[in-house]
Amino acid sequence: NTSCAGFNTQSDRTKVTTDAGEYVVSRIDGTNGYVLLNSTADRTDNGTGRKINTINIYDSTGSLKKRYKFNYGYFNDWSPYAIDKRLKLLNFSELGITGTDSLVYKFEYEESVNLPSTISTSVDYWGFYNGYTNSSHFPNLYYSDGLTTIRRVDYANRSANPDYGKANILTKIIYPTGGYREFIYEGNTALVSTFSHQYPEPDYLTNQSFTRTDFLNVISPSRAMTQYFSVNSTNGGAVFKYTLGVGGGCGSGYSVKLYKVPVAEDDFGGTLIYNYSASTFTTDLLNGNYRMEIYKTSTGCSFSSLNGSWHESTLNTATITTPNGTFPRNNRKVGGVRIKELRDYDPVTNKTNTTQYLYKLYSTDSAYTSGLLISTVRVVSTENFGADVGCDYYKLLSTSAYPLASEGGSYVVYPEVRTIESGNGRTDRIYNFMSDDVPSGFPAEPPGDNSHNRGQLLSERIYDQSGTLIRKTINTYTNALSQSQASIRVKPYFMAGWPTDWQEGPYTVNDVPDKAACNTWYLMSHPWTLASTTDSLFSPSGTIVSKTENIFATYNGGLLPSKIKTYVNNGAIKESSFKYVFTTNSAFTFGLTTPEQTMKTTLSGKNYLLPLEIVDSLKPASGAATLTGGIKTIFGTYNTDNIHPSKMQLYSTLTDDKEINLSAYDVKGNLTEKYETNSAKEVYLWGYKGAYPVAKVIGSDYATVAGLVDMSVVNNPSTEAVLRAELNNIRTGLAGTAAQVYTYTYTPLVGMTSATDPSGKSTYYSYDLFGRLILVKDEDFNIIKKYCYDYQGLPVNCN
């Protein structure tokens, strides 16, 4: 639209620079200790950035329990410039309490290709290094909206290049025992929507050109040269550039004519589309046949050469229909890399186990990738369209017009993945997918975030080594319609009283816009949750199928399970039903007393969303369902105004129940006393500032037990021996009664160190310097169990 009076119509390039500061956590305090994170600002890749050197973990007394030390280096450390360097973690050490022994984890990286300068323009659309030499970030472009087509090839190549995209990525973790995990990568691929502005990568471009030097020394109207060529690009056209070597004596006495002709090498017909005296020119040509004619007005004018060049897209326009939409049949390279294979080496067995990942569209056509972009590349935005102010125009951006969304750090999602484990068969998994919504109005509303509908497992098929299916799982999901919030985005316009190409309003701070474009959009969420699971186990003896179905109640836009039904092979149905604070009182199977109804209202006001009642039943293939069990939770108020469960009623029939009374809590919410109606009380004494239970007494009450010890010692024991002696006062004080006393000691932040039963026999637990359980000893300190760990730090059989 050329009606742009009052608008700045100059071709502008705007550079946006963002400065950001950061806060680095230095200390974290908890009930049983604190963590110190020690950092320094001596990085050579970033003058103001900090790096964490050590992490120290202390208990509440200030005793060091564990320490981590981090050692760093730099990629491109040869450079004297900070913008060329990148910080890398070489290793970290886990040090024990003494600070001498350590477990060292080492890291290796891909360094055959290194990342460029932090201000490099050699990046793809997604920000990954691509190795191409670019003078700016503005990308090459193919854009078409059905009315307007724009092609640009003299800007930046922003295509993904996996050979460079893997620069400096982590390739190996070496464990303290010598084992390691190695990562093998490959480039991301995706089926790309036709709405993408992503220019064809070199794999999908054919370079076409011609060079001529055989000019005739004739003057107009005779032709000094005729050149025929054709453009056949799958995106409908190409950017054509010619260069004519013009010698001396020509001046402006020559011309270049370009005709579009109906058939190849048509020597006289066609439509003239270009006629200028220019030694070089670039223009956008549609697919078809063309004829170039070179003329001169003097035999003294000479030409050295005629060169023409253009790129033709070879992208396939045929489509493939997948469970997630219809896409052109092209495996496009997109930003970043993916895991191709994991290799785990065990130094004990000297074996390497491999896990391979295949990202193919097995459900439709395995010749194509299963990868899909969460949001398509849109580097063109449409401005003022539909705003009724004139001056519609297109804006080219160096990054996507709408933020490129990621899931777990990746811009690509693979709804289908095959996993192959060495010697252990394969597993095929399919996940749900929904791309993010791209704004269509003006002013553009924020892109829709559909991450709630991505990544849920739809199906899993497990095959043995021979390829035989042994298990199949099918999941379905449901969602609730949530509340929505209407929003409006506005772009104001200030109308100038005269045409201007250099100034836009407002001219004073109090100017009121003359006009505004408005766009309404809605903010809402759609929570998805599992609706049903069907498991099928296959064996030579037959197939066992079980199905679990979840039925939900909607509350405040959210979903809560109201029933869970399990169907088994004999036709029976096991059902669990759930009642909540929003359930009507009459719907409770076990009923509600008046105080319980009042508490239900109180809990509703506090948005309590756990079930108050659960009822289990069994319905045979024929006949009525019978109750098999149930539980009802009754709440009470403790310590003035803290609400906790006060009773648990366990039902085997509608009238036969067992009542568990939860009679006391401490101020931290720890249960301190419970009992079954008409049975002995069970007391829990909490120590270490309420972090760990140090005594369990059956056959007494909390007031009596707490009165037998000094709680200041229980909460802050100087040693384990002191605490054991203090807890022994409970045994002494209750001697001669039927009470049974169990006591426990701990090393805070590590684990239990001793447990003493009612007979006075103790079991002791020992840990290594890294806080891992290694020995269990009896009361005579004889070893009764030993724990060992593999190269990854996981427990293994010591034999």
Image (cartoon, grey):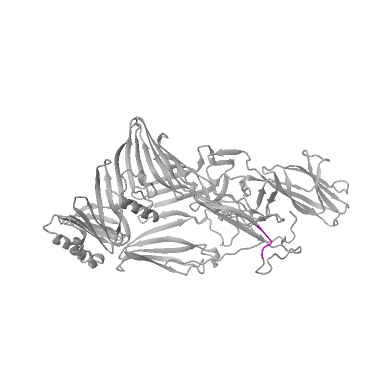
Q: Is residue 262 left or right of residue 12?
A: right
Quarter of the rendering containing residue 619: top left
Residue drawn at (47%, 55%), measured in percent from left and top?
170
Q: Main secondary structure of the magenta part?
A: loop
Q: Is residue 315 above or below residue 795?
A: above
Q: How many marks?
A: 0
Q: Is residue 362 left or right of residue 10?
A: left
**Residue 572 belongs to the span the image colors magenta:** no
Range drawn in magenta: 512-516
In percent of width and height, residue 285 lies at 73, 46
Between 425 and 562, the one nearer to me in the picture: 562
Between 202 and 179, the one nearer to me in the picture: 202
Between 689 and 515, the one nearer to me in the picture: 515
Q: Is residue 567 above or below residue 448?
A: above
Quarter of the rendering containing residue 367: top right
In percent of width and height, residue 615 lies at 32, 42
Q: Is residue 244 above or below residue 38?
A: above
Between 71 and 288, the one nearer to me in the picture: 288
In percent of width and height, residue 478 lies at 46, 43
Residue 405 at least partly seen? no
